[in-house]
């Protein structure tokens, strides 16, 4: 759970989880996913892999490409980092584990040139 960047969250209300190759977000305070993503300058498409032309064929689904999985992972890391940043900006003190994760996310995103 994390503080939602879409509203003035004093207590963590945002759930971010993974389902297959998708990132799921839910604010228990009622914010729409589009509002949450807009607050961190992202779009719904950032949480889902791209589909190819064969998606609508009557064939069994193919496993997602490895780079698609990496895109979903990158979106998850960016959201987690931006949530930590929003928590600090609103005066919330991070726990030692949250701080360690935020630093690791920052260093990773900076290293690959994807820092939001």
Image: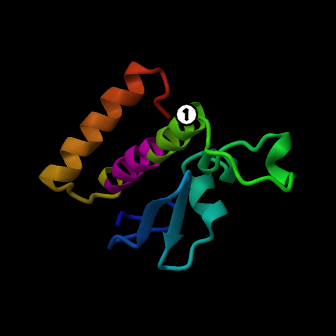
Residue 78 colored in magenta in the image: yes
101 w.r.t. 26: above or below: above
**Is 13 positioned to the left or the right of 36 in the image?**
left
14 w.r.t. 53: above or below: below
**Residue depicted at 66% across the width and 61% down the height:** 34
Task: Please identify the dominant SS of the magenta region.
Answer: helix
Return the residue nearer the eye: 68 or 84: 68
Residue 70 colored in magenta in the image: no
**Residue depicted at 57% across the width and 72% down the height:** 31
Q: What's the magenta region?
A: 77-87
Q: Position of residue 13 (x, y in %)?
A: 40, 73
Q: Residues within 10 Å of mark 1 (few under 14, many from 20)?
A: few
17 w.r.t. 78: above or below: below
**Residue depicted at 25% across the width and 44% down the height:** 101
Q: Position of residue 104 (x, y in %)?
A: 27, 35
**Residue depicted at 46% across the width and 48% down the height:** 79
Question: Which SS class for mark 1?
Answer: helix
Return the residue nearer the eye: 62 or 4: 62
**Is 32 positioned to the left or the right of 76 in the image?**
right
What residue sits right under mark 1 in the picture?
A: 66
């Amino acid at each position: 759970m994390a503080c939602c960047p879409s509203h003035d969250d004093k207590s963590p209300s945002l759930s971010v989880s993974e389902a297959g190759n998708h990132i799921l977000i839910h604010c228990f305070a009622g914010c729409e996913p589009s509002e949450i993503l807009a607050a961190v300058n992202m779009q719904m498409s950032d949480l889902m892999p791209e589909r190819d032309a064969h998606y609508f064929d009557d064939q069994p689904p193919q496993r997602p490409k490895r780079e698609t999985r990496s895109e979903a992972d990158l979106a998850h890391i960016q959201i987690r980092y931006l949530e930590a940043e929003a928590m600090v900006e609103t005066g919330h003190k991070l726990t030692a584990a949250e701080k360690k994760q935020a630093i690791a996310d920052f260093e990773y995103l900076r290293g690959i040139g994807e820092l939001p």
